[in-house]
Amino acid sequence: MNPNKQIVVVGGGFAGTTLVGELERRLPPGYQVVLISEESYTTFNPMLAEVVGASVFPEHVVAPIRQMLDASRGTQFIMGRVVAVDRERRIVSASTLAGLREIAYEHLVFAFGTRANLDLVPGLAQHALPLKLVGDAMFIRNRVLQRVASIELQADAQERARLGHFVVIGGGFSGVEVAGELEDFLHGALRFYPRVQRSELRVTLLHDQDRLLPELPESLGRAAARSLAGRGIDVRLGTRASEVTAQGVTLSNGEALAAGTVICTIGTRPNPLVERLGVALQRGRIETETDLRVRGASDLWAIGDCAFVRNQAADGAVAPPTAQFAIAQAHQLARNLVDVLASRPTRAFGHVSKGMMATTGHLKGVAQAYGLRLSGLPAWLLWRAYYLSRMPTLGRKFRIWVEWTWGMFFAADITHLRFTRTQDAEREALAP
Ligand SMILES: Cc1cc2nc3c(=O)[nH]c(=O)nc-3n(C[C@H](O)[C@H](O)[C@H](O)COP(=O)(O)OP(=O)(O)OC[C@H]3O[C@@H](n4cnc5c(N)ncnc54)[C@H](O)[C@@H]3O)c2cc1C
């Protein structure tokens, strides 16, 4: 490969994979793309709540990156973690299955997202369950099933109430969706646990602002709160968690909520790689010029959650860290890169949001799309149709559609899958 004709993209999330797909179609002959990402798949984060609620299998909210690339165009995928960038030599160092590898670039794009921040509240890291990765979603689902199973074996009424109390911190998209999914899941699972009463299972949603979903118009935030509350979820607005312990959550007003499971959907922190790049940062994100170039650099670019981008050609505001903006930036950057290679002027990023939506449980949701405000079933259907359309390959779309249809008529799967290997099982069996 000619390193002078190589575009290297770091991060295979929404931003990175969209960019690579666009570049494959637009790059002039001779140019190749190398995508480096830690995992072999892209995670559809907006669908993680569905894994928690067993509405879909974990495999269905991820898409294999290799399946999304066009190998016939010479695109290379390297599974590895980028650990350093040598800007003088134009070399990226990545830790891979085969050890440290150096990859040369002509242009380098950062699209490596952010990490979860578990330092926001004391005790969060030790006692709360974050929801950021597909592994988190699977862990939470298993924990929920463990809790319900332990209630059956518990005689103490107070401890039963604590085990059956699930607290979700954060009333943004993922918090609202997880709370709704959890409530449905618990409700559906109950029939298999005859020694657990409906009244012993509770979901509480904590949000420190005065309405849910601050990204949506106020009326939809209120509609989401009503929808959740109508199904028995205790929605606490203007309520901040001040500490998480093994026993539950302490609120800033001093009230202690006894809870067996605390799920955290708030807070992100910069990817540690950001600090090692020696580039300008704004609020922990990589500062970019209006055309998505890293400030002060000619061959470095940044898009998605890791980038601080002004929506210059639209409203001039800072672009929010959402999948929609990550995808829009990827499209614009592909055009700009092609223009740079052809020595044409680049254009400023600009995107007008097409809308936002969230589900609040089975058959319910809120949405704002193309100026329309929807709630209830139409919003829920729109949400499903949109994410189904974004899934790569027809086969995957079909499998998810079948699974969703199945879930409308049959109970959710309550298998508590353990990842125990034979050696561990043997050790456990022999333990006194
Ligand atoms: C639970 C949850 C729900 C959400 N719901 C919504 C929603 O409803 N609507 C919406 O618009 N947005 C939602 N979001 C936000 C949305 O997922 C992000 O804005 C979007 O994923 C950003 O895309 P990205 O490509 O910038 O980053 P990511 O999708 O995070 O991808 C970054 C990629 O970079 C890789 N990577 C990281 N570090 C390295 C490294 N050093 N070397 C190589 N690879 C690396 C990671 O493995 C990952 O694949 C949600 C997020 C979460 C966590």
Image (spheres, rainbow, N blue to C red):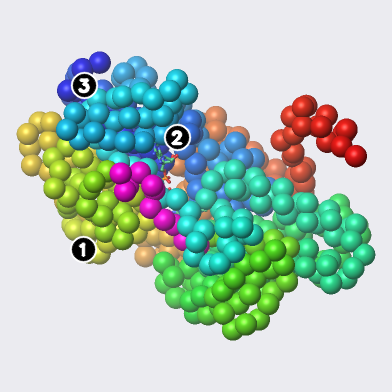
**Residue 268 lies in the magenta-colored region:** yes
Sequence-wise, which precedes: disc 2 or disc 3?
Answer: 3
Q: CA distance from mark 2 to mark 1?
A: 33 Å
Q: Is residue 96 left or right of residue 138?
A: left
Identify the disc placed on residue 316: 1
Mark seen at residue 3: 3
- Please tell me whether residue 23 is drawn above or below residue 389 in the rendered image: above
Amino acid, disc 1:
Gly
> What crowding class fits label 3: few (fewer than 14 Cα within 10 Å), some (14-19), or many (20 or more)?
some
Quarter of the image that includes the N terminus: top left
Q: Residue 296: x and y, percent? A: 13, 48
The kind of residue tagged 3 is: Pro
Left or right, 133 with reference to 189: left
Q: State yes or no: Cβ of the residue under disc 3 lies below 8 Å from any atom of ligand 1.
A: no
Residue shown at the point (47%, 61%) measured from the top left: 267
Instruction: Give the number of the disc on residue 38.
Output: 2
Instruction: Name the element at disc 1.
Output: loop
Is any part of residue 417 visible from this angle? yes
